[in-house]
Image (cartoon, grey):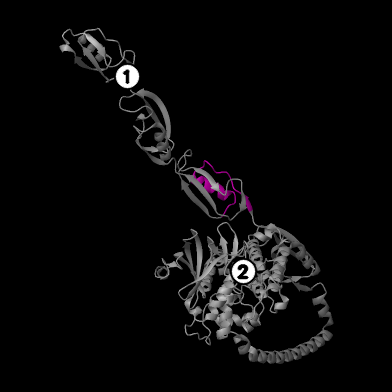
Amino acid sequence: MAATVTDPVLGTIVDGRYEVISRIARGGMATVYLAQDRRLDRKVALKMMHPHLADGSDVVARFRREARAAARLSHPGVVGVFDQGTEGETSYLTMEYVDGVTLRRRLASRGALSLGEALSVMESMLDALAAAHRAGLVHRDVKPENVLIARDGTIKVADFGLARAVTEATMSSTGALLGTVAYLSPEIVTSGAADARADVYAAGVMLYEMLTGHQPFEGETPIQVAYKHVHETVPPPSEDVAWLPFEVDEYVASLTAHDPDDRPRSADAALAALRTMRAGFDDQVLAVRADVDPSLAEVAEIANEATDDVDREGHTAAVPTTPPGGTVVLPIGAVRDRDAQAEQQSSAGNRRRRTRRRRAVALILVVLFLLASAGGGAWWYLTIGPGAYTTMPDVVGRAESTAMATLDEAGLDPTTATDYSDSVPLGHVISTDPAPGDRVEKGGAVEILVSQGVLRVSIPDVAGATEADAQQELQEAGLDGTIGVERDWHPEVEAGLVVGTEPAAGSTVDHGVEVTLLVSQGREPITVPDVVGSPVDEAVEVLEDAGAVPQLGDEQFSDEIPEGSVITQDVVGEALRGDLVTLVTSKGPELFEVPNVVGQQYEQAEATLTELGFDVDRDNILGGYFGTVRSQSLEAGSWHPRGTVIVLTVV
């Protein structure tokens, strides 16, 4: 957190346009920030190359050229490049901002992906790489950190252009290459040369990692990992994950072949092979995932994301001890030059060992021949007679039909039993009795335990039950995963009772899936506001916003409240969401008909009008000597509210 807070770039405006909001990630070649494009009012990913990489003009020129090439690459699986420029001595790119996580983060949280998920990621990634290869653009730094998974599941590949620009410039000026050593192809390590097949190799290493939860080659220093890429073959992933089909082993082997000519020539060819292979797998096989501890993958992630600053003086003779997943500077040819003599010495030693081995085998054959001649009867009994024994073949992980045929060929009498398995696909062997390698009599009975796949359970309907009863019912149904509880207000279900589940009742799920109980807290407490005096429409809206249900009651006359406004309400203050609030509304003031009092004596007229609620004023003419009403200020027969003043003219 401290590193982020003190980053001097945060809060600045780059090139007068991009306001830096936060730091997303830092790698060996650049730092990525979330920024706001003030001109187009959108969020972008701002990638700023480390200043020490721009010491030479060659790096900057290559960076700009590759940025222009990447910007021309339009594909839904490629993170788009919007702009390129410089801020001081630092070159930058603005790219599409993808709201999600990197594949590295996904692996850290899950440990490994299911076969189906891994192949889906590969398909999207290869599709994006294929578009780049057709455009003549090689990525050179394909790794989980450069594969982004958006919140909607879309897969996008980032960093086209930057890796190539920096790496080529570094090679030309220092004789060293920049890259993530865990995914470098042998030819990049030995010569620095790379074409589309180098990206294919890196993709193959990533598929291995997605399936097994770890990289195929590990070492204490980058040079050790690079050595293994050059001198060893990527092992079959089934060595770690036994249930993987052999087709996956063959596919990984083809992508990571040591000789580039033995690999698919581009991502297009690798993608076509992947789709053909995947079509042969059923849903059960695609759904299985290796049991990898995510905590170990998280440690690997920390190592993979760690990077060391490159020597600011430009020296590259000493190989840095960066973790295998980090971006490192590696002298071109260091592995080939350093290990050629060792390889030659190893070959000579191997020839001497083979010679000694051939001599030992010849001696053993002579001894066996003598023993066989002397004990022919015993040999017959032990090899083909009634006392003959054989070794139990290893058929664990194979399809049932293949396992039965293998046991028949071994002269054994196999029977089958079935059980569910979280790791072994449907129809494949979980275990055998006797165990593989055990001594068993020829013709003897053996048993194979065949997988019925993952136990699938239908989620029962527990709506209306108490939390404890619902948990017991889910467990009795065979659901043995985590049962979580999520509580929320509910307008109808009593507090403490179950509203439903996620996944919903009736869904068929794996027995170990996490089920969440949605438990009611009852109706939500609310505060009913005072709307007396407000117009009815406004009062109804205010009450509904507060969670109450307004109901219009009687209408009454009111001298104080205008017509159409609220006179009274029966609930104010604390209540529950959905409670009724009855409103009494105003019809305005009550009106009375003005009588004709002209010709009456003033006292009589005043009494009549006052009784009706009117106020009376007297206006005398000539002193009002006779006391007779000559005229009235309001016309007789007109209607007016109580309290209206009527002026009587008296003569």
| Highlighted magenta segment, given as a residue range | 456-480
Residue at x-position 44% and y-position 36%? 578
- Is mark 2 in CB contact (under 8 Å) with mark 1? no
What is the C-alpha distance between the residues marked 2 and 1?
91 Å
User: Above or below — where is 173 with respect to 27?
Assistant: below
Instruction: Give the label on residue 177, or none.
Output: none
Residue 315: percent from the left, percent from the top? 50, 86
**Count of labels in the image:** 2
User: Above or below — where is 328 with respect to 352?
Assistant: above
* Mark in the foreground, 2 or 1: 1
Three-letter amino acid code at disc 2?
A: Thr
Disc 1 target residue: 640
Tag 2: Cα neighbours inside 10 Å, few (<14), some, or many (≥20)? many
Mark 2 or mark 1: whose residue is earlier in sequence: 2
Residue 270: quarter of image = bottom right
Residue 476: percent from the left, percent from the top? 57, 49
Three-letter amino acid code at disc 1?
A: His
The reply to whether residue 177 is visible in this rendering is no
The quadrant of the picture occupied by the C terminus is top left
